Image: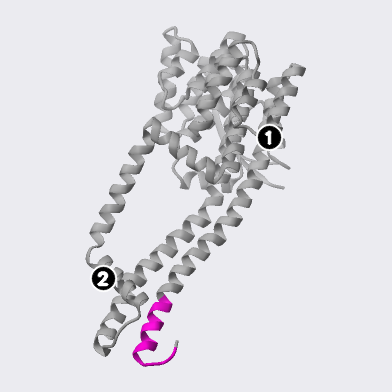
Amino acid sequence: MPVFAYRATTIEGTIVEGVIEAVDEGSAIERLKNTGHIPLKIATPKEGIKKKLFLKSPKSDLLTFTTELSALLTAGLPLDRSLNILSDISESREMKNVVQSILKSIREGSSFSDALQRHPRVFPRLYVNMIRAGEAGGVLDVVLEKLNEFLESSKALKDYVVSVMIYPAILVLTSGVSIIVLLTFVLPKFSVIFDELGGALPLPTQMLLTFSNALKSYWWIFLSAAIVGWIIFKNYTKSDAGRYRWDAVKLKLIGDVIRKLETARFCRTLGTLLKSGVPLLQALNNAKDVINNQVIASAIDNVSAGAKEGKGIAVPLSDTSVFPQLALSMIKVGEETGQLDTMLLKVADAYETSLNVAIKRFMSLLEPVLILTMGLIIAFIIISILMAIFSIIELPF
């Protein structure tokens, strides 16, 4: 039977840690609840070791905070006591300070959402707005549960995209290093041999040797040019016009992947906000903020204008021509049946699954293209050297 490491708290606020045997994670949680404990973290021992080996990011701290606070509030503990417990058990010094600051603000009379709003680097605007809606409706524990689901699904999607990009990144890096080694260390040795033997070299070999000598002698110029070019590109894409044009280029190159990614992200955010009680217009503005592609984000402005005029969102979204037709049809059905929030989450689930397939298809094309490109460059270098050798010893190539 699997063994799970856990961290839990008692009703009195005492933190306990240990291990428990259970069939799965859900069973482990139930067993802890039956013993009178409130589970905060459940993980296999291997997962606990992995978490200690890597530094936590602010987003992982936010997910941990949301998960633990949701568990404490669901168990019936008041907000200030729950925050006090979280400040004691937080493993991140920065997050501990943030929680203590929030607790201080609440004790001074601020609302929970206002206290969160003072830390925009940790708590994004849509997070604060969802908490505010939960406070207004008296369903803060339910909203935190929805936020926890939202953050977990967003993290899973991001982790998947990062994991599939690891192999192409390693491939480009190793191939690039191999080409640089050939040009700066291997070719110059052949250049000395060719000079000693004399004779006319083929044009490809001359071009290659000229580039190799320039790279070896003026590498600092090439490196400086690359760095300056990268800085100029980054600054250009930070401007509104530059980012919009770059996003338009990306939309033309990998439009299918980007559209599915942004559709899943927009629908999950909007559906979660609506399900948490956030008004439609406010939810649309918040959902627009999570869209990275500015071409698609700018089109959402028309949706907000249409919603203000009472047109709903299905028709204005259809007019933008940026979302897939299937998603638009599902959203329209959701509006007609009065279950827009539920249908938006179903659209998000469908397109996250479809996105995984699209990414796999894209990577299956990208990997052979990268291998072929790097192979052709290396083949050109080797063939140029062989042509020079055969021409010197007067053998037909």
The residue drawn where x is 53% and y is 40% is: 251
Q: CA distance from mark 1 to mark 2?
A: 55 Å
Judge left or right: residue 23 versus residue 256.
right
| Image quarter of residue 33 | top right
The residue drawn where x is 60% and y is 16% is: 306
Residue range of the region highlighted in magenta in the rendering:
382-396
Q: Is residue 175 above or below residue 4?
A: below
In the current view of this chain or complex, which residue is farthest to the top? 109
Residue 371 seen by the camera: yes
Question: Residue 129: image x %, image y %?
Answer: 53, 17
Q: Which mark is residue 213?
A: 2
Residue 290 seen by the camera: no
The number of discs equals: 2
10 Å neighbourhood of mark 1: few (<14), some, or many (≥20)?
A: some
Question: Residue 344: image x %, image y %?
Answer: 67, 26
Q: Is residue 258 above or below residue 163?
A: above
Question: Residue 227: image x %, image y %?
Answer: 30, 50
Q: Amino acid at mark 2?
A: Asn
Residue bearing the label numbered 1: 349
Q: Amino acid at mark 1?
A: Asp
Question: Residue 271: image x %, image y %?
Answer: 64, 23
Magenta stretch, overall SS: helix
